[in-house]
Image (spheres, rainbow, N blue to C red):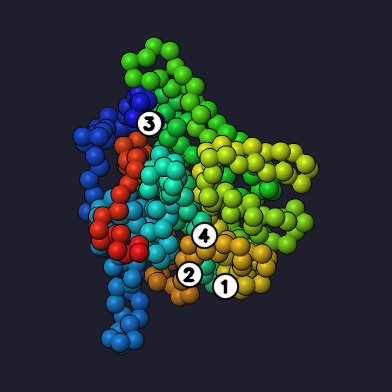
Amino acid sequence: PVSQIHLEGYMDIDPERPIYTESNPPVRKPEPKDTKKDQQWDPELEADRLSDAEVILSQIPPGFVHDMVAATRGVESPTEFCLWSGLFAVSSALQRRAWIWPAPYQLYPNLFLVYMAPPAINKKSTTVRLATKVLRGVVKLFEDPGDREIFSIPIHDGAVTPEGMFDLLKPRTAMVYEENSIEPIEVHIGSRLALIVDELASFLGKQKYNTGQITRMINLYDCKDHDSNYTIKGNLKTMEHVFFNFFAATTPSGFEASIPEEAHGGGFLSRIILVRQDRPTRYFPVPFIPEGAPSIEELARRLAWVARFKGGEYVLNEEAQEMYE
């Protein structure tokens, strides 16, 4: 359990900045100046209004998702894409250290996230790529090598064959110190991966080596304690305590024409969060960082705080339980 691991503090990159601790959490920064919020057409009002994503963002408690959205206000990505990219980063930071429901029915916060928009509209991958930069920055904030392994996640950004994917999911270990211990002990962290794919159709296409990819993805989504697969070459790949996050982008025509038939059944689509935007929500000739928005380094420091201090079992309050049901 993470609570039994002795965790050292952060490397203080800038001595003028406070070190976020359990008793000194990050606080929400003010909304960046000149923020342009998304609008959507309301046929009943016959006028534009704040988009559903903006309304949701205003209703959830302050946290890293707000920070992520603030940092992306200067790009042509809809707020809904930015919001889910923040959740993708939080999910990748917490991994199996956060869950709902008691054992043996734990549900972990992994995401299969697919952004859909017409070509060259809404910058589908921009915000997720920012999230991966932030995740890579988290590693640098821990002095202890064991902490770096525990609180980071391997990220693969690009094409990968099924065989290569299982190589990336090889179980990992870390040498950590228990509280008041002198010698480190080996801790099994498991098989973890955040896979970022530019084009969903190429990943799930009809190439021969992709045969059975849908079934493999379903197994990975379920974050099993133990799993194994035979590759095309006949090699047995074993995984332990799986945590697998997946992001891909696609167009409506690419999704309909290129996804194999097996993707439309067997539970694969029910595991995907499909975020679709057909129209641009804002226009910027050149992307920019809004004044007052958190930097990538600051986002990494805030996400590292989430990773370190926000693990454990989560319980839905009454309102959330009603929405879930």
Query: Are the residues tagged 3 and 4 within 8 Å (C-beta)?
Result: no
Give left or right: position of 50 versus 280. Answer: left
Residue indicated by mark 2? 276
**Foreground: 227 or 119?**
227
Name the residue tied to disc 4.
Answer: 271
Answer above or below: position of 181 versus 276: above
Which is nearer the N-term, disc 4 or disc 1? 1
Name the kind of residue labelled 1 in the image. Pro
Label 2 crowd bin: few (<14), some (14–19), many (20+), radius 10 Å: some
Please name which of the two marks, 1 or 3, marks the residue nearer to the observer.
3
Q: Amino acid at mark 4?
A: Arg
Q: Is residue 145 above or below residue 195?
A: above
Report helix, strand or loop for mark 3.
helix
Q: Quadrant of the N terminus?
A: top left
Position of the C terminus by quadrant = bottom left
Answer with mark 3 or mark 2, whichever residue precedes in sequence: 3
| First reached walking from the N terminus: tag 3 or tag 4 | 3
From the image, tell me which residue sits under label 1: 252
- What is the C-alpha distance between the residues marked 3 and 4? 28 Å
